[in-house]
């Protein structure tokens, strides 16, 4: 990993010039536990915890391997709680309201998902849309809280915490609340000249979600979480 | 972090790495004892899976473009618009900017994704003119952008739920929305199935680049 530039101190390649290559077949369990492999390119390093705020980056493919932050656990739990509250509230409140020709109509996220329900074979899309913008983001946030709360409280990990965190990680690409938020803005532009459109309270909640999701993914150091689940 | 001597891959060291939690285990270990992930030094059927999902995604993308995405009923007319048709209509009304955005999001990016995944998979088999770092970046862009294509489906859902103004205007989703969603989902699965370690396997891991103050052994 890189020892120069913004990551200075994150790694110390210079100390390794005399490090003996580990004996090939017979690495002890303790030696294995001290190694880390880049998930992108398979390069193996001896893990050295960087100082909080610094990052250890793979020398070969630039993937960020370790990026610990001070008090990250508390911050992620706070953000996850906010995500749960926002998604649930935003599901029920209207996010856009429309007015044209003397008629008005407001729409909530639930309505948006149900828009497909009457469309014959596309009805399954209703379920998929609800899952992508409501159920999966909430489930992910709850899983993260379940996994991190005992760690933050210096307690032993919750039962099946590893499986919970693995599920949360697997669901990450399928959690699309923030994409829906941008979709609201696009829809607004598309019908702006057809009708008068107003933002509802849920729109602002989803806008806040965009920011929260970015923070949530930026703060989380996966390596640190797995490391603390190991005990 | 430290490199123990030359930079080597887990496979070269007789180890298998967990791509979920970065732990390493002796080769042949079936499951990661830390996180429970199934371990493969290289996903054995990775490329077949990439191509299978890729083909399904591409097949879904054809009806997604041929059939209407939106059906708009107003007082005077009923209009079925396809993705490209809708953009052309916007352009004809002078909304060049929005037309361009729609064409980029619904045509250029999906097509670019199919080409990028295909070139990554072909590059593993037959070698590639692109350097490994470039291909890795390409893979990361595809992984990042892939889910954003779902925005089109969400826009259809939003419009269909919102524009319910009785006789004045009514929008309902067309059959293309289902196929477009399927295309996005299968393209995402295809990209996820790609094992990026295959990009780097073509060449042996290089020695650590020389750094001021020391030279890795
Ligand atoms: Zn693992």
Image (cartoon, rainbow, N blue to C red):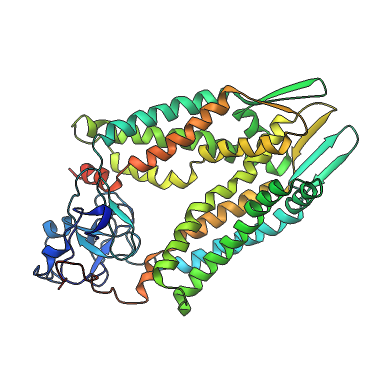
Query: Which quadrant holds residue A63?
Result: bottom left
Residue at image point 83% right, 24% down: A101
Say left or right for A50 vs B172.
Answer: left
Residue A117 appears in the figure: no
Residue at image point 52% right, 70% down: B119
* Residue B133 place in picture, x, y as percent: 39, 67
Could you tell me how many numbered marks the image carries?
0
Q: Residue furthest right?
A: B76
Instruction: Give above or below for A189 relative to A30.
Output: above
Question: Along the line of sight, which residue is nearer the eye, A178 or B42?
Answer: A178
Say left or right for B185 vs A198.
Answer: left
Query: Which quadrant holds residue B171?
Result: top right
Residue A231 appears in the figure: yes
Instruction: Give above or below for A142 relative to B64.
Output: above
Say left or right for B185 vs B203.
Answer: right
* Residue B64 place in picture, x, y as percent: 70, 53
Q: Residue furthest bottom?
A: B126
Residue at image point 33% right, 31% down: A77
Question: Along the line of sight, which residue is nearer the eye, B196 or B26?
Answer: B196
Image quarter of the C terminus of chain B? bottom left
Question: Along the line of sight, which residue is nearer the eye, B163 or B38?
Answer: B163
Question: Along the line of sight, which residue is nearer the eye, A46 or A51?
Answer: A51
* Residue B38 place in picture, x, y as percent: 34, 56
* Residue B102 place in picture, x, y as percent: 67, 49
Instruction: Give above or below for A117 relative to B108.
Output: above
């Amino acid at each position: 990993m890189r020892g120069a530039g913004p990551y200075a101190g994150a790694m110390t390649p210079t100390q390794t010039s005399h490090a003996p290559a580990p004996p090939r077949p017979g690495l002890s369990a303790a030696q294995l536990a001290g190694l880390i492999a880049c998930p992108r390119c398979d390069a193996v390093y001896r893990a050295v915890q960087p100082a909080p705020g610094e990052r250890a980056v793979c020398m070969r493919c630039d993937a960020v391997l370790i990026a610990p932050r001070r008090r990250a656990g508390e911050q992620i739990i706070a953000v996850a709680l906010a995500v749960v509250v926002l998604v649930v509230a935003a599901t029920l409140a209207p996010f856009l309201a429309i007015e044209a020709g003397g008629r008005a109509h407001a729409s909530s996220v639930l309505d948006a998902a149900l828009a497909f329900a009457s469309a014959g074979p596309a009805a399954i899309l209703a379920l998929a849309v609800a899952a992508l913008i409501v159920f999966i983001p909430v489930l992910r946030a709850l899983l993260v809280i379940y996994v991190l709360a005992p760690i933050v409280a210096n307690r032993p990990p919750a039962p099946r915490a590893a499986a919970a965190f693995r599920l949360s990680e697997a669901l990450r690409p399928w959690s699309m609340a923030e994409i829906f938020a941008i979709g609201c803005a696009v829809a607004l532009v598309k019908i702006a000249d057809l009708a008068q459109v107003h933002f509802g309270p849920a729109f602002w909640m989803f806008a806040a979600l965009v920011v929260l999701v970015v923070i949530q993914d930026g703060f989380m150091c996966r390596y640190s979480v797995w490391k603390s689940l190991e005990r | 972090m430290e490199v123990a001597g030359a930079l080597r891959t887990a496979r070269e060291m007789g180890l298998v790495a967990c791509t979920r939690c970065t732990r390493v285990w002796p080769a042949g270990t079936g499951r990661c004892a830390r996180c429970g992930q199934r371990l493969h030094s290289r996903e054995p059927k990775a490329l077949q899976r990439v191509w299978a999902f890729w083909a399904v995604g591409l097949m879904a993308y054809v009806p997604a473009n041929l059939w209407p995405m939106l059906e708009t009923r107003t007082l005077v007319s009923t209009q079925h618009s396809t993705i490209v048709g809708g953009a052309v209509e916007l352009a004809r009304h002078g909304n060049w900017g929005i037309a361009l955005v729609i064409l980029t999001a619904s045509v250029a990016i999906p097509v670019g994704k199919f080409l990028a995944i295909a070139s990554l998979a072909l590059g593993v088999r037959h070698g590639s003119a692109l350097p490994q770092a470039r291909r890795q970046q390409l893979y990361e862009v595809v992984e990042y952008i892939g889910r954003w294509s779902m925005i089109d489906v969400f826009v259809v859902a939003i419009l269909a739920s919102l524009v319910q103004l009785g006789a004045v205007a009514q929008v309902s989703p067309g059959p293309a929305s289902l196929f477009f969603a399927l295309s996005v989902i299968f393209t995402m699965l295809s990209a996820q199935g790609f094992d990026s370690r295959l990009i780097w396997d073509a060449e042996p891991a290089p020695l650590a680049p020389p750094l001021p103050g020391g030279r890795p052994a």
